Image (tube, rainbow, N blue to C red):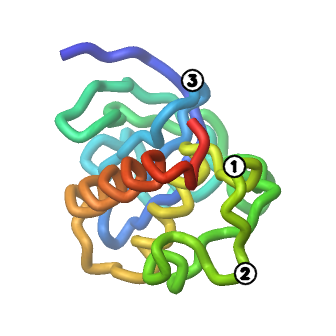
């Protein structure tokens, strides 16, 4: 197993369920974070907060450990990522095969994979709050792979 010390921004952290995701400054997949790996009180970890963590290669993707705060700014002062210039996923989008009736299917409309992955994670957390982190990761990777094979997301 390997790890690298990196920084990033908390995308979302559910302190009731005890997990969330970080957007690494290195880019790539969102990094899973669990309350057991936080060095400070979990209520301090909210969207937009800058953190430093050990990035590890987990069984289902990147995992953060030894997560510590770098600053206390949050969603009130800074965003985790710039908002994409494309529309957000809605609940009905997945039921319609990933594209709503008013969406164009042209390649120029494809979301970057990282943005699609982030929006899908947010949608799953909102619509099915009983999912475990392992279930979210499994569903997310299956849907992302399917979207990539159909050209709905750009690499």
Give the mark nearer the N terminus: 3 vs 2.
Answer: 3
Label 1 environment density (alpha carbons within 10 Å; few <14, some 14–19, many ≥20): few
* First in sequence: mark 2 vs mark 1: 2
- 33 lies above or below 118: above
* Residue located 42% across and 66% down the image: 14
Q: Is residue 19 visible?
A: no
* Residue 84 image position (x, y, % from top left): 76, 54
Please identify the quarter of the rendering in which residue 75 is found. bottom right
Q: CA distance from mark 3 to mark 1?
A: 26 Å
Residue at which label 3 appears: 26
In whole angstroms, how far apart are the C-alphas of marks 3 and 2?
34 Å
Q: Position of residue 149 (x, y in %)?
A: 43, 47
Task: Tell me the crowding category of disc 3: few under 14, some 14 to 19, or many 20 or more residues within 10 angstroms, Cα based.
Answer: few
Residue at left 37%, top 25%?
55
Figure quadrant of the N terminus:
top left
| Residue 150, percent from left and from top | 48, 53
Front residue (pair 43, 56): 56
Name the residue carrying label 1: 107
**Mark drawn on residue 1:** none
- The reply to whether dot 3 and dot 2 touch (C-beta < 8 Å) is no
**Can you identify the residue that label 2 sits on?**
102
In terms of depth relative to the viewer, which is nearer, 146 or 87?
A: 146
- On the image, which quarter does residue 93 sit in? bottom right
User: Mark 1 or mark 3, which is nearer the start of the sequence?
Assistant: 3
In the image, 66 versus 90, the foreground residue is 90
Seen in the picture, residue 4 relative to 38 is either above or below; the reply is above
User: What number of labels is visible?
Assistant: 3
Secondary element type, mark 3: loop
Secondary structure beneath disc 1?
A: helix
């Amino acid at each position: 197993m390997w790890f690298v010390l990196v920084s990033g921004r908390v995308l979302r952290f559910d302190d009731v369920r005890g997990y969330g995701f970080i957007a690494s400054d290195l880019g790539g997949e969102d990094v899973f974070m669990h309350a057991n790996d936080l060095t400070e009180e979990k209520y301090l970890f909210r969207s937009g907060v800058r953190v430093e963590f050990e990035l590890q290669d987990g069984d289902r993707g990147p995992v953060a450990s030894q997560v510590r705060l770098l600053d206390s700014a949050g969603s009130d002062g800074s965003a985790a990522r710039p908002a994409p210039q494309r529309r957000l996923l809605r609940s009905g989008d997945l039921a319609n095969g990933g594209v709503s009736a008013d969406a164009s299917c042209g390649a120029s409309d494809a979301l970057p994979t990282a943005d699609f992955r982030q929006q899908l994670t947010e949608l799953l957390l909102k619509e099915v709050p009983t999912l475990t982190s392992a279930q979210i990761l499994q569903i997310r990777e299956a849907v992302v792979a399917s979207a990539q094979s159909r050209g709905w997301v750009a690499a």
